[in-house]
Image: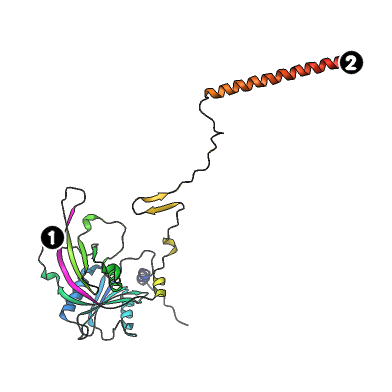
Amino acid sequence: MLHIKTPKSMRAKRALEKRAPKLVEYGKKTLILHGTKTSNVLNSVLTEIYHLKKDNAVKYSRRNDNIRPFESGGETSLEFYSLKTDCSLFVFGSHSKKRPDNLVIGRTYDHHIYDLVEVGVENFKSMASYSYDKKIAPLIGSKPFFAFIGEGFENVEELKHLKEVLLDLFRGQVVKNLNLAGLDRVFVCTAVSSKKVLFTHCALRLKKSGTIVPRMELVEVGPSMDLVVRRHRVPDESLKKEAMKIAPELIKKKEKNVSKDAIVGKIGKIYVPDQEVGNASLPYKPKGVKRERREAKAAKGEDNSNKHAEKKLRKQQDDDVSA
């Protein structure tokens, strides 16, 4: 039987609790790795991706000869590093004659490969090549905007997959509310063709507009590059179904007779029971009711007088018979 190791100190126990699954997960950590051979361009790309995610990323500078994500058995070392650093995202850079300036972006589930996207880097421009006012430089750890321009992100399967991976890579922790003053950057992705995407990082400058909502201007601060989609591997349906499970505690109970509309908002239905108006007591007495009562009283008086006359006649007849 396997021996189960238990933490012997409070520090080890806290570390295990931090890695344990949670109902609401923190921002995903990114692992940045180098392949057997990398070019100067690719080294700069990996360094700047690490700078953009410096608050939540781990970067290894040594070369790794055994990592080949798309080959069977070549992902063992990658999964080991993912488990060691507790990272669910990874960026792997390699350079070869067949695939120059190659970048593999992927996600893991339970520290096993979930999906992969392989892109080639072209026309790279680093942050140092841009000149701008350093006061508007984005802060480390700030939440970004995303702008996906082009129909390819909705129609082409490769670009749809690339869009999902880029969103997971740069969005950080998912939040419900944002302070407008803290928004200082935007990632602009433009689909030039079915295989090529222009990726740009811009700073967000807020200016007066005469209204409550400020006017926004984009200032390119880098990095900027062209991403050419080469290969991609989507997750299996069974693995995807397992990864998309939601904890029962987070599932909201269905509200009866309530629906939501994109324009109107929340719409509710109210069912009113049948109202018995005839038996309800009225706050006033209309004149028609008084007349009906008089007629009813008069009819009742006639009935009483007829009964009295019949009773008198019957008594008289009984007296005659007795006499």
**In 3D space, how far apart are the residues under numbered discs 2 and 1 (Cα atoms)?**
130 Å
- Mark number, residue 322: 2
Q: Secondary structure at mark 2?
A: helix
- Residue at 16 percent across and 50 percent down: it is 209
Residue 250, x across and y down, in percent: 41, 61
Q: Secondary structure at mark 1?
A: helix
- Mark number, residue 22: none
- Mark number, residue 135: 1
In the image, is residue 230 part of the stretch drawn in magenta?
Answer: yes
* Amino acid marked by disc 1: Lys
Specify few, some or many for label 1: CA neighbours under 10 Å numbering under 14, 14-19, or 20 or more: few
- Residue at 43 percent across and 61 percent down: it is 249
Q: Which residues are magenta?
A: 210-233
Residue 7 visible in rendering:
no
User: Mark 2 or mark 1: which is in front?
Assistant: 2
Vertical order, 44 against 287 (above or below) = below
Quadrant housing residue 126? bottom left
Residue 173, x across and y down, in percent: 30, 64
- Residue at 33 percent across and 79 percent down: it is 79
Which quadrant of the rendered structure holds the C terminus? top right
Quadrant housing residue 178? bottom left
* Amino acid marked by disc 2: Ser
In the image, is residue 217 part of the stretch drawn in magenta?
Answer: yes
Of callouts 2 and 1, the N-terminal one: 1
Q: Is residue 318 left or right of residue 231?
A: right
Q: How many numbered callouts?
A: 2
Residue 151, x across and y down, in percent: 26, 67
Specify few, some or many for label 2: CA neighbours under 10 Å numbering under 14, 14-19, or 20 or more: few
What is the chief secondary structure element of the magenta stretch?
A: strand
Q: Nearer the viewer, residue 140 or 170?
A: 170
Residue 26 visible in rendering:
yes
Asked if disc 2 and disc 1 are in contact, CB closer than 8 Å, the reply is: no
